[in-house]
Image: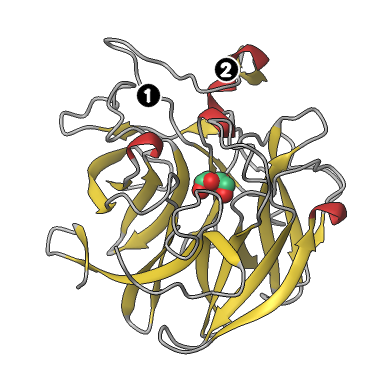
């Protein structure tokens, strides 16, 4: 896929795009060069700050609002500021960010700003009950806000097991492992409703079911369709669209449901594999058209952890199916 990087002066990835005050704001990861060897744990994605970008039109210039939050200003985080997302409510702006805590466990925290372009002030602790990576916030038309999250392997989702109603971390499952074999169901992404103040969970963390054409949960060995990471939620024509990366098969896939809690029925792919191992996206309506923001490694000529944000238009057919617009 060859479109132009939106941002050329630094490497950016995992773009979460939102329309605030009639502008597009992009909340990406800020990739940086390191000499950490590539591994399946994602150690090479060793980011230490976030920038925010804005655009008044899709084809117009992109403004870099500079560093809006640094790792050193997040009291609970030890390393790896991975894919963030943002939301607005109550006249404030909230940045949801995953990072490893001081035990090496991925958690999700929140930072607050008065303006969409920050600067953001991190809360002292991560969100109680949060875990894994790739938070995606979604505020429904009735004002109820949700946080979707999770990512397997380096994102540690496979380490979290339910024990007597509680999610418990099993360090023996760290590394590239996940369920496999006949009858094994894929790991589910997670969702919780956010509190009115947006700083914590109102509900317990729930699993989000993705079903196949027969109404059965996607199987663990179905790597072309099973959830890996990069949750995103948007609403179109009254339906809830949950989209995600399939990880080691490198697709952005989507599934459609009647409720923000699911279940979601698998519908297909939005993006084929891009250059680079990871693929991660967001979908937003702007100017009466729909856009997918994503990243690839064209600018770095294929270095997996040096990615660049791009954008393309998407359209819907009469059945609600998504495809890229040429
Ligand atoms: O940017 C670090 C990680 O790579 C993200 O959290 C994943 O979604 C993948 O894009």
Q: Residue furthest left?
A: 318
Q: Position of residue 222 (x, y in %)?
A: 27, 26
Residue at the location (42% across, 69% down)? 310
Residue at the location (43% across, 30% down)? 188
> Considering the numbered disc 1 on the image, is that residue within a helix, a strand or a loop?
loop
Q: Position of residue 308 (x, y in %)?
A: 50, 64
Question: Label 2: how many residues lie within 10 Å, few (<14), some (14-19) or many (20+)?
Answer: few
Q: Position of residue 86 (x, y in %)?
A: 61, 62
Question: Which residue is more in the foreground, 257 or 11?
Answer: 11
Vertical relation: 253 (above or below) 290: above
Vertical relation: 158 (above or below) 80: above
Task: Give the residue pinned by disc 2.
Answer: 161
Asked if the residue under mark 2 is in contact with the one under mark 1, i.e. CB atoms within 8 Å, the reply is: no
Residue at the location (37% across, 49% down)? 243
Q: Which mark is residue 44?
A: none
Q: Position of residue 112 (x, y in %)?
A: 76, 63
Instruction: Report whether 303 appears left or right of 45.
Output: left
Instruction: Report whether 268 appears left or right of 179.
Output: left
Instruction: Report whether 212 appears left or right of 283.
Output: left
Can residue 287 be seen here? The reply is yes
Question: Label 1: how many residues lie within 10 Å, few (<14), some (14-19) or many (20+)?
Answer: many
Residue at the location (54% across, 74% down)? 8
> Considering the numbered disc 2 on the image, is that residue within a helix, a strand or a loop?
strand
Question: Does the closest atom of ligand 1 sit within 8 Å of the Cβ of label 1?
Answer: no
Can residue 135 be seen here? The reply is no
């Amino acid at each position: 896929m060859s479109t132009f990087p939106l941002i050329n002066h630094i490497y950016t990835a995992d773009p979460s795009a939102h329309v605030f005050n009639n502008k597009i704001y992009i909340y990406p990861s800020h990739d940086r060069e390191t000499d950490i060897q590539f591994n399946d744990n994602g150690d090479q994605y060793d980011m230490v700050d976030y920038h925010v970008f804005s655009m008044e039109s899709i084809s117009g210039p992109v403004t870099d609002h500079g560093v809006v939050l640094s790792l050193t200003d997040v009291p609970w985080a030890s390393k790896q500021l991975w894919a963030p997302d943002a939301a607005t409510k109550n006249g404030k702006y909230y940045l949801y960010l995953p990072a490893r805590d001081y035990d090496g466990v991925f958690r999700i925290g929140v930072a607050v700003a008065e303006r969409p372009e920050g600067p953001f002030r991190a809360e002292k602790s991560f969100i109680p009950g949060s875990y894994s990576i790739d938070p995606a916030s979604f505020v429904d038309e009735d004002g109820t806000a949700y946080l979707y999250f999770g990512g397997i392997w380096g994102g540690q989702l496979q380490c979290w097991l339910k024990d007597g109603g509680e999610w418990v971390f099993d360090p023996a499952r760290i590394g590239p492992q996940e369920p496999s074999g006949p009858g094994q169901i894929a790991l589910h992404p997670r969702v919780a409703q956010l509190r009115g103040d947006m700083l914590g969970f109102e509900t317990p963390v729930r699993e989000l079911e993705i079903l196949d054409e027969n109404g059965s949960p996607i199987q663990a060995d179905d790597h072309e369709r099973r959830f890996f990471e990069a949750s995103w939620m948007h609403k179109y024509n009254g339906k809830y669209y949950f989209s995600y990366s399939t990880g080691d098969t490198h697709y952005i896939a989507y599934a459609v449901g009647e409720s923000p809690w699911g279940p979601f029925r698998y519908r297909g792919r939005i993006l084929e594999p891009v250059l680079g191992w990871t693929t991660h996206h967001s979908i937003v309506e702007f100017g009466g058209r729909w856009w997918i923001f994503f990243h690839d490694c064209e600018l770095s000529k294929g270095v997996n952890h040096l990615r660049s944000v791009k954008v393309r238009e998407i359209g819907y057919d009469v059945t609600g199916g998504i495809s890229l617009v040429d």
